Image: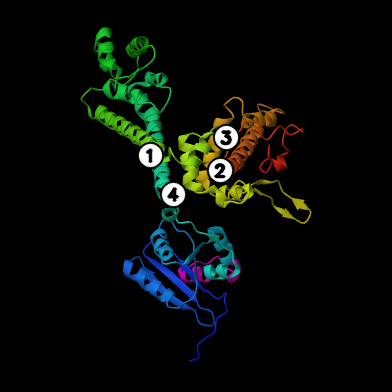
Amino acid sequence: MAKVEHTSDARVLVGIDISKNRHEVLIAVPGRARRRRMTVLNTADDYRRLIDVLQGFELPVMIGFEATGNYHRALMFALGAAGFDLKLVSSIALARTREALHNSWDKNDPKDAQVILRMLEIGAVQVFHDPLVAGTCDIQELSKTYEMVARAKTELWHRILTHYLPLYFPEADRFHRSSRGDWFLAFLEAFPSPHMITSMAKEAFIEAAWPVIGRRVSKAALLADIYETSKASVGLPVAPDSDAIRMFRLVLAQGRSLIQQRNAIEERAAELLSAHPDYQLLRSIPGIGPVNALAVLAEAGDLRRFRHHRQFLKFCGMDLATVQSGLFRGRSKISKYGNARLRRTLWIAAQAAVLKPANSFRDKFERYIAQDRHNPDVRRKAYTAIAAKMARTIHAVIKSGEPYRPFFEGVSPGGRTPLCRAVEAGS
């Protein structure tokens, strides 16, 4: 058979449908009408077999895939290390293209590989950044584990407030002020029932509880208040050695363990990122604390890869989208087709920023809600605008390499930003 001559821009296109145990691979080689199908198992031998096949074509190889959980990470790392060009396919774009090509919502792995190959041909793909290669793997794992621990702690805290305290010590609820502190759980672990407190003399209780609650302001007054409150408590008179109290203490110990894990992650993150220039720049922005800075770096990676802030807004899902057909034009809303964790981080940072004095975030928020300060819909839109401004500011600070400067943008002469431009506005 005669050798096929290839043009200088010829390349092999590979569509891979990712799954947990096996991957469906479809290979299109220039000059060959028939496509080659392969099934690759999640084993080192099959990875090597696929790499050998692709390298045997002696042409540049572009590989497209849809991220599926974390099942793609090992395969894509191996293919990237072999020098292949990796492209990420949007799940939404894949679904829409599949419906357009096959006139059906029917979905299966070989069909998805065909659709991914088609999207490679038309260029409807994104660049894939492997976290391990980009150097953000440790940051991502710290951020995701921190979120997992924080969620577990919040769920457990709500269980304590809504189940255990109403049963055994309802009046203790007013003594806690923050879920970040360990002293309240430590106190309940030592004195889970008010009947255990009142069985002691007041002086004896204060002496026993003094080292438990840590360094509290007006410690003696606080303990005296707790003792007097315990005397009038309506908590169930369960025995100190009962299984009910044992289970309460088990949950309290779990809560204290989660607090310790969260604090350890925060300390490690601060140690890891203390010399990171982007981390220092992010910390200069109002509302961006250590945890929010960690989340931004973990989810966005190097923000310099976004040439314009609109690209970063779209990556976050903070870009505007409008339904329009004929003479009908709907209201502009944020698309929410982007990184949900990053969008949530921007929202939290925006709420923190407007509480701080002397910064442009608070200034814009006040101008936005000036028309009706107590309207919840206006306040929600204002927070959305501030979150989008936070994204633009983060991008600008990282791109310029200069710390945040309050009121650098100036105040727009018209006062409040129009609703249709709330996300894109520069002020």
Q: Name the residue furthest left.
A: 241
Looking at the image, which is closer to me, 285 or 323? 285
* Mark 3 or mark 2: whose residue is earlier in sequence: 3
* Neighbour tally class for label 3: few under 14, some 14-19, many 20 plus, Cα within 10 Å: many
Looking at the image, which is closer to me, 148 or 279? 279
Q: Which stretch is magenta?
A: 99-114
The reply to whether dot 3 and dot 2 touch (C-beta < 8 Å) is: no
> What label sits on residue 149 in the rendered view?
1
- At label 4, the amino acid type is Thr
- At label 1, the amino acid type is Val
Which residue is at 23% across, 22% downward?
240
Q: Distance between the residues labelled 2 and 4?
A: 16 Å
- Label 4 sits on a secondary structure element that is loop
* Neighbour tally class for label 4: few under 14, some 14-19, many 20 plus, Cα within 10 Å: some
Q: How far apart are marks 3 and 2 (CA)?
A: 18 Å
Q: Between tags 1 and 3, which lies in front? A: 3
Which residue is the site of mark 4?
A: 136
